[in-house]
Image (cartoon, rainbow, N blue to C red):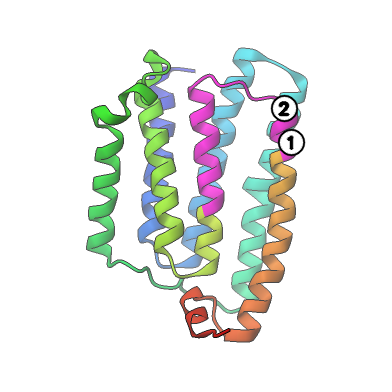
Amino acid sequence: MNLLFLQFLSGTILLLIILLLIMKKNFSVVFAYGLQSLIVVIILLNSFFEKGGLLMLLAILVILVIKVILAPVFFIRLIKKYALSFSASTYLSTPMTLIVITILVSIVHSHKFLPLTSIVPDHQVLLSLSLSAIFLSLFLIVNRKGALSQIIGILSFENSIVVFAVFANLEQSATLQLGIIFDIFVWLMIATVFISMLYKHFGTLDVSSMKHLTD
């Protein structure tokens, strides 16, 4: 696959995470995550065509089913079940969020991370974009108050790590990928129970409500 096209895909993943940080509507957040996961599948397919392996192809198909189809359906059902129209607010305001985004991306593109982003010289731009996506996904997890947005942040973080590993030419066995996907599937089931209990007890998915808990 053309290097410029890979850069476009990586830049799109980064842009989608930025949108996840500033979006308010839950349906938009789910759509952005689904699109991000689809792009990850395309990047993995490119790696498959270069390296081959039927087991790897199986892992990619499982990722497609779990991340691109089942996970968004799971989130949409949660939104409809609990009549959620908007995500919980963020800890930082939108202007402050944009400032932090700029700072994090600037840090990744600084000389401090050059040894890491230069592991594969030809992929320096790709690695910088992927590392930025990792940092912003972590920020998404800690900045959102809504449990749903935090769950999507964790999945986005995992997507970013996978993409970084591909561009860094790190060895990724298909068995490992299948194991990770199985963990995500089980984790989604556990998250369903957690969100149900949280909503029944507090009447909201805003995790900041839990600060009222006492020992």
Closest to the observer: 199 or 37?
199
Magenta span: 154-179
Q: Are marks 2 and 1 in contact (CB under 8 Å)?
A: yes
In percent of width and height, residue 43 lies at 54, 28
In percent of width and height, residue 189 lies at 73, 60
Q: Residue at x 48, y 22 (%)?
A: 168
Q: Residue at x 49, y 39 (%)?
A: 160
In this rendering, the answer to whether 54 lies above or below 81 is: above
In percent of width and height, residue 35 lies at 52, 46
Mark 2 lies on a secondary structure that is: helix
Q: Amino acid at mark 2?
A: Ala
The span from disc 2 to disc 1 (Cα, nearest Å) is 6 Å
Mark 1 lies on a secondary structure that is: helix
Q: What mark, if any, has residue 174 been given in the picture?
A: 2
Residue under label 1: 178
Q: Residue at x 27, y 53 (%)?
A: 100
In this rendering, the answer to whether 77 lies above or below 113 is: below
Q: Residue at x 63, y 85 (%)?
A: 201
> Counting other residues with Cα less than 10 Å from the Cα at mark 1, is it few (<14), some (14-19), or many (20 or more)?
some
Q: Quadrant of the C terminus?
A: bottom right
> Counting other residues with Cα less than 10 Å from the Cα at mark 2, is it few (<14), some (14-19), or many (20 or more)?
some
Q: Main secondary structure of the magenta part?
A: helix
Q: Amino acid at mark 1?
A: Leu
